[in-house]
Amino acid sequence: MTKGNAFVLGASGQVGRAAVRALAADGWEVTAASRGGGRDGRWPDGVRTVRLDRTEEGALAAALGDGCDVLVDIVAYDGAHGRQLTGLADRIGSAVVVSSGAVYEDGEGRSFDTQDRPDGFPAFPVPVAEDWRTVAPGDSTYSTRKVALERELLAAGDALPTTLLRAGAIHGPYCPGPRELWFVKRALDGRPVRPLAYGGASRFHPAHVDNLAELVRLSAARPGSRVLNGADPEAPTVAEIGAAIDAVLGVESETVPIEGPPEGVVGLTPWTAEHPVVYDMAAAGRELGYRPVVSYAASLPETVAWLTGHLADRDWREAFPGLAKYGVDFFDYAAEDAWMASSAR
């Protein structure tokens, strides 16, 4: 006997793939919906695939047919997507929707939207819980759009019980912008040193796809209107992340701490943060009985193997356009060498 039918929107992405696996293993009849449909790769036995572009008028309604017991939306982005789901509430038993930890702002009104301004990086409580303040809803930034999405879905209440998962720094196989590449490529290039801003003490809470998938699985089985953080059981420093990746690759690199912000691109990593960003996971344990299925360090061998295989002999920008889109050369070794030579004088 199945638990019901689950419809996963955005199934071909890094979180979607993990969510499909977790739901199928838990006894759900799963429909994996994505723009590529069945061409997106191998799926667990019994999973139905469907090609779907949610921006096409009536496409989602048609794909849902008579409806589903739970809809998992990995790719909802803004208030319009929230209204799209609430408009189909009569066909959806409950929903689980991925939001972002980027929605929070600190007591001074600083958020990830202000981080590029002088003294603009937010200083959150450690850890930050779900009842902490957020940016105002809107359509101007990623953060404001995610808040608009949340507000639309929470306003639906019992008409569409929705669990919103505020994900941390997502990592794992199939990541379009893998932060771990910063260390993996250096090891593959034989780069012996790694300068790290803020003394290597930056903490930007990671969230492995399997831990997010476990939250999806538990939320599907326990419908409700709620907001939960989604992150790993630990929030390692960037220096600890580097050491853990070195251990997987069997190399030893020298960390060169920069006591302060990056010097241009020197010392800048995808985790660099002036203040720690750590998410409180207690509510997920209380409400869902959630326990993480993997630690950050234990997840790394699979991630590193996928990264090295996907990179192969290609330029990193070609292999990982999701990381390249930020326009930062994370591997400017000449700039690092010049900085270290200057610092040694």
Image (cartoon, grey):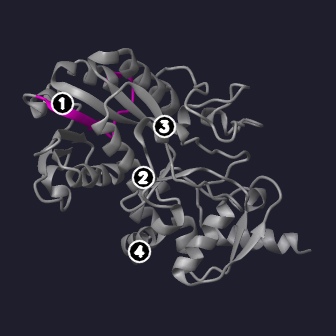
Q: Which residues are magenta?
A: 67-80
Asked if the magenta segment contains residue 123, the reply would be no
What residue is disc 2 on? 211
Residue 133 picture location, percent across and down: 61, 24
Asked if the magenta segment contains residue 75, the reply would be yes
Residue 303 left/right relative to 279: left
Mark 1 in CB contact with mark 3 (< 8 angstroms): no
In the image, is residue 75 above or below residue 81?
Answer: below
In the image, is residue 339 above or below residue 15?
Answer: below
Q: Nearer the viewer, residue 344 or 54?
A: 54
| Marks 1 and 2, how far apart at CA | 31 Å
Any mark on residue 305, and which?
Answer: 4
Residue 55 picture location, percent across and down: 23, 31
Mark in the foreground, 3 or 4? 3
Mark in the foreground, 1 or 2? 2
Q: Residue at x 53, y 72 (%)?
A: 184
Visible residue check, residue 229: no
For label 1, the crowd category at 10 Å Cα-Cα, with few meaning under 14, some 14 to 19 and many 20 or more, is few
Q: Earlier in the sequence, mark 4 or mark 2?
A: 2
Mark 1 in CB contact with mark 2 (< 8 angstroms): no
